[in-house]
Amino acid sequence: MVSDTLVGVLGFAVVVGLFVWAYRDATRVDVSRPLLWAVAVAGAFAVGVCLYLFTDAPMTGVIMTSNTGLVLYGFEREVTVEDDDPAEPGQLP
């Protein structure tokens, strides 16, 4: 079908874009092992695209799988970027 081909082509383009973005961002922010995080982000999205194209997986599972790498990288980035100063009483960070 045309829609499956379009999903495949756009999915591949997004996987490549996510890989480049995650690697550049992880390098810029000084996250340890930027190549591993780029592979995790792009790989999880690629698995989600493959689930959509080649299986009858429920859409919620496809979405959850596709977002897993981005969410985990977001947590790691937040931990890396946060400062080590103790919290001030009565103030939000």
Image (cartoon, grey):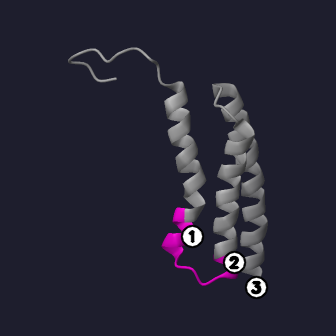
Which residue: 69% across, 77% down? 53
In the picture, residue 57 is in which quadrant? bottom right
Vertical placement of residue 18 versus 90, above or below: below
In the picture, residue 51 is in which quadrant? bottom right
Which residue bears the numbered disc 1? 62
Quarter occupied by the N terminus: bottom right
Q: Which mark is residue 20?
A: none
Vertical placement of residue 19 versus 62, above or below: above
x, y (%) of residue 15?
A: 73, 56
Residue toward you, 40 or 59: 40
* Crowding at mark 1 (Cα within 10 Å: few <14, some 14-19, many 20+): many
Which residue bears the numbered disc 2? 53
Q: Which of marks 2 and 3 is in front?
A: 2
Residue 44 falls inside the magenta stretch? no
Vertical placement of residue 91 versus 65, above or below: above
Which residue: 67% across, 51% down? 40
SS under mark 1: helix
Magenta part of the protein: which range?
52-64
Count of numbered circles on the image: 3
| Residue type at numbered disc 3 | Met
Residue toward you, 6 or 26: 26
x, y (%) of residue 10?
A: 74, 63
x, y (%) of residue 36?
A: 71, 44
Q: Is residue 21 visible from the viewing direction of this image? A: no
CA distance separating discs 1 and 2: 10 Å
Q: Which of marks 1 and 3 is in front?
A: 1
SS under mark 2: helix
x, y (%) of residue 20?
A: 76, 43
| Residue type at numbered disc 1 | Val
Relative to 85, is 25 on the left or the right?
right
Which residue: 58% across, 49% down? 70
Which residue bears the numbered disc 3? 1
